[in-house]
Image (cartoon, helix red, strand yellow):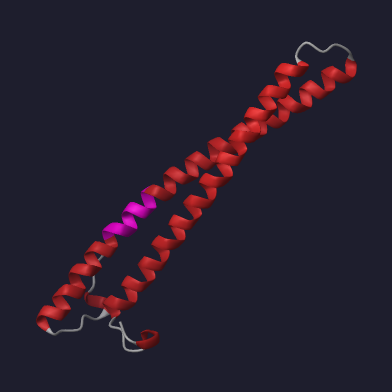
């Protein structure tokens, strides 16, 4: 890799882009996982509150209980969406890893054959 990527071959440029994309996807997965873990902790706290207020009587207790239950439902839905998104991103990450492998192959061939591939010659 050259200084600032100025003299990078097309293969190296693509490798750099896909590696950056792979890092970005990894960061998003980690962020979503942290958010989901936090939401699950909140769900557990809410569940404990529900147990506390389940025996309470009166109109205010009923309203409070319903609000807590509604919040718990929304957090559960958010966790499900996070899990689906994480699964999708993991699949995308595998595709990116495969493309990086193919580009590494091209880069190795460039070094062995002392040849520079053009973008039109690269198939990933």
Q: Position of residue 42 (x, y in %)?
A: 65, 34
Taking the image as shown, residue 76 lies to the left or right of residue 101, namely right
**Predominant secondary structure, magenta span:** helix
Quarter holding the C terminus is bottom left
Closest to the observer, 103 or 124: 103
Answer with the quarter of the image where residue 53 lies. Answer: top right
At 37% from the left and 48% from the top, the residue drawn is: 91
At 50% from the left and 54% from the top, the residue drawn is: 28
In this figure, what is the number of numbered marks? Answer: 0
Answer with the quarter of the image where residue 114 lies. Answer: bottom left
**Magenta-drawn stretch contains 96:** yes
Q: Position of residue 11 (x, y in %)?
A: 27, 76
Q: Position of residue 80 (x, y in %)?
A: 54, 35
Residue that protrudes farthest toward the right in the picture: 59
Answer with the quarter of the image where residue 95 lies. Answer: bottom left
Residue that protrudes farthest toward the left in the picture: 113
> Is residue 68 shown above or below 86?
above
Taking the image as shown, residue 63 lies to the left or right of residue 109, namely right
> Is residue 75 shown above or below 95?
above
Q: Which residues are magenta?
A: 91-98
At 75% from the left and 18% from the top, the residue drawn is: 52
């Amino acid at each position: 890799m050259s200084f600032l990527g100025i003299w990078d071959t097309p293969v190296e440029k693509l490798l750099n882009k896909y590696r950056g994309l792979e890092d970005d996807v990894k960061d998003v997965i980690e962020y979503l996982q942290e958010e989901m873990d936090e939401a699950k902790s909140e769900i557990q706290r809410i569940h404990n509150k529900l147990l506390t207020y389940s025996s309470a009587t009166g109109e205010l207790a009923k309203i409070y209980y319903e609000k807590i239950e509604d919040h718990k439902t929304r957090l559960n839905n958010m966790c499900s969406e996070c899990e689906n998104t994480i699964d999708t991103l993991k699949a995308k990450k595998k595709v990116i890893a495969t493309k990086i492998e193919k580009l590494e192959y091209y880069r190795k061939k460039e070094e062995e054959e002392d040849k520079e591939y053009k973008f039109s010659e690269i198939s990933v």
